[in-house]
Every structure is written in C-alpha cells, then in structure tokens.
C-alpha cells in the first residue's frame, strides 16, 4: 500500500493493501479502495464510493456517493481474467454511476478520457472506449464495446447497443435507443433513434467556421442519396471540401460491421 502523506482519508474508509493513493487525494466516509486501485493527484471520493479491480483514476477526478467503479464485467463469457478500467483526468462521476472493467475478448480495457461528466445512475459497460469531454445525462446505459468519440452528449434515459460507435460532436436526444453507428456532428432523436440532422448548436459553440458547416451539410445530404457506405466511397473519390466533411467520410469508411443511423431510422 502506498499512501501519499498529503492525502486526507476518513477513519471509516477501507484502503486495501496494494492500493496507491496519490498526493492531495481526499477519501470520504465509508469508501472502499481495492488492492489494485491507483488514484492520481487530487482525486476526490466523497463517501460510500467503491473502487475495485485494476482501476486507475486520473488526477482531479471527482467521484460522488455510491458510485461503483471497476467491478467485473456483466458478461457471461467472463471467467475471471485480468482486465482493467482506466479513467482520465478531471472527470465528474456522479451518484450511483457504474463502470466495469474490460473482457479478454474486447481487449481487456474499459477506457474513459478526460473532463467528462457522468450524471447520476449512468452505466459504462465492459470494453467501452470514451473520448474527452463526453457527457452522459442521468440513467444513460452504454452496453459493452461502445465507442464514443470526443464531445459526444447522450441525453437522459437513453440506451446504446453493444459495439455502436458515436462520432465526435454528436448529440443524442433523451429517451433514445441507439442501435446503429452515429456519424460525427449528428443530431439524433426518437425512441427508435433516427438521424434528424446536424448538431448545429454544438458546432457553433465550438466556433466552427460557416463554410465548414455548409460543406458538412452538403456532404450529409449527399450521403442520403444511397447507402451511406456507397455514397461515402463515391464522395471520397470525387473529393469534398472541409475537414468536417472528410471526417464524416472517414468515419463511415472506418472499421465497423454495423449499419448507420439514417434519416427516419
């Protein structure tokens, strides 16, 4: 066990032998920190937080009461193999959030980027890969192997099917069930989620130039003229203007066996 002298640990907390507690960490009442857990500088566990498994928490991450991170995956194929959970810097993980370690078949790692917000009762399944500045609103559930790129927002009470990819800057409306890949910068909504357009609010907030948005819109409209993959190949060969338009084409032509959310689907 390695506990930095500057760490503040409540007398009722349980720190198991082997845990690493970094400088300026604060561990509140009735927390449990397992033997393979590593806490970076300034990590805060408020109270009743349970950290287990080979779990690494990045610096200045705040974890709120009753969160449970690093428990074994909810996968019947799991047989006790060594897998990990790695969480980046400056995340806010709210009450009752659960995040599981990975599986051998999925690469053995569940990974969360930096500066995310995971609101109450969210679940991050085994082998998920989550980028930076991602927001999961209350009670979002990510099944195993999902990939969420940077700046994705998923609305409350939404579910994401296993192996789904959600591209950078996309926003998913509340109460949506996402069963297919979502292109970058998309606006998705509906109980059986469909592509409703572009996340124009997010694009403007990030200071995206007007010409980039115009080119992106034209590209997405052209994709709807046939299957996304066939249209993307044609557009890629012909060439498109703008980095965001090329980003969407690269995403569609990337490694995935899943279909894509399209208008009305």
Image: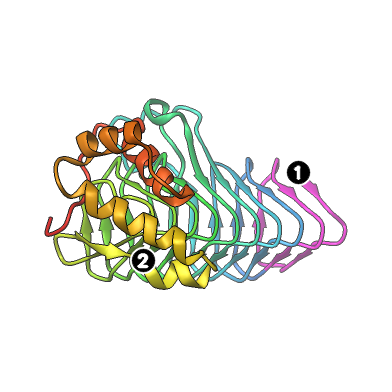
Magenta residues, start to end: 1-27
User: Of residues 43 and 203, which is closer to you in this image?
Assistant: 203
Q: Position of residue 62 (x, y in %)?
A: 62, 66
Q: Main secondary structure of the magenta part?
A: loop
Q: Is residue 263 above or below residue 71?
A: below
User: Of residues 119 and 200, which is closer to you in this image?
Assistant: 200
Q: Which residue is mark 1?
A: 1
Which numbered disc flags the more N-terminal residue, 1 or 2?
A: 1
Q: Which residue sits at x=66%, y=52%?
A: 58
The answer to whether marks 1 and 2 mark residues whose Cβ atoms lie closer than 8 Å is: no
The mark found on residue 54 in the picture is none
Q: Which residue sits at x=22%, y=69%?
A: 175
Q: Position of residue 74 (x, y in %)?
A: 33, 43
Separation of marks 1 and 2 at Cα, in angstroms: 47 Å
> Is residue 24 inside the magenta stretch?
yes
Q: Which residue sits at x=43%, y=57%?
A: 98
Q: Which residue is mark 2?
A: 199
Q: Quadrant of the C terminus?
A: bottom left
Q: Which class describes the residues within 10 Å of circle 1: few (<14), some (14-19), or many (20+)? A: few
Tag 2 secondary structure? loop
Q: Which residue sits at x=42%, y=47%?
A: 241
What is the quadrant of residue 41 in the picture?
A: bottom right
Q: Position of residue 64 (x, y in %)?
A: 55, 70
> Is residue 10 inside the magenta stretch?
yes
Q: Which class describes the residues within 10 Å of circle 2: few (<14), some (14-19), or many (20+)? A: some
């Amino acid at each position: 066990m390695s506990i930095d002298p500057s760490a503040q640990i409540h007398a009722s907390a349980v720190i198991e032998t082997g845990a690493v507690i970094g400088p300026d960490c604060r561990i509140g009442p009735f927390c449990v920190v397992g033997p393979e857990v590593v806490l970076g500088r300034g990590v805060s566990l408020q109270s009743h937080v349970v950290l287990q498994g080979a779990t690494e928490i990045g610096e200045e991450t705040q974890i709120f009461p009753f969160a449970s991170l690093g428990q074994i995956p909810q996968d019947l194929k799991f047989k006790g193999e060594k897998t990990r959970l790695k969480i980046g810097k400056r995340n806010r993980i709210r009450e009752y959030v659960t995040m599981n370690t990975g599986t051998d078949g999925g690469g053995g790692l569940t990974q969360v980027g930096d500066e995310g917000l995971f609101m109450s009762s969210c679940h991050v399944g085994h082998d998920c890969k989550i980028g930076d500045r991602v927001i999961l609103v209350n009670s979002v559930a990510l099944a195993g192997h999902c990939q969420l790129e940077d700046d994705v927002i998923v609305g409350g009470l939404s579910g994401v099917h296993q192996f789904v990819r959600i591209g950078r800057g996309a926003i998913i409306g509340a109460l949506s069930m996402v069963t297919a890949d979502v292109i970058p910068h998309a606006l998705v909504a509906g109980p059986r989620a469909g592509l409703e357009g572009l996340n124009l609010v997010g694009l403007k907030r990030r200071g995206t130039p007007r010409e980039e948005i115009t080119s992106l819109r034209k590209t997405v409209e052209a994709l709807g003229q046939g299957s996304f993959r066939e249209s993307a190949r044609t557009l890629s060969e012909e060439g498109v203007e703008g980095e965001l338009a090329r980003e969407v084409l690269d995403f569609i032509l990337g490694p995935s066996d899943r279909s894509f959310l399209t208008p009305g689907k």
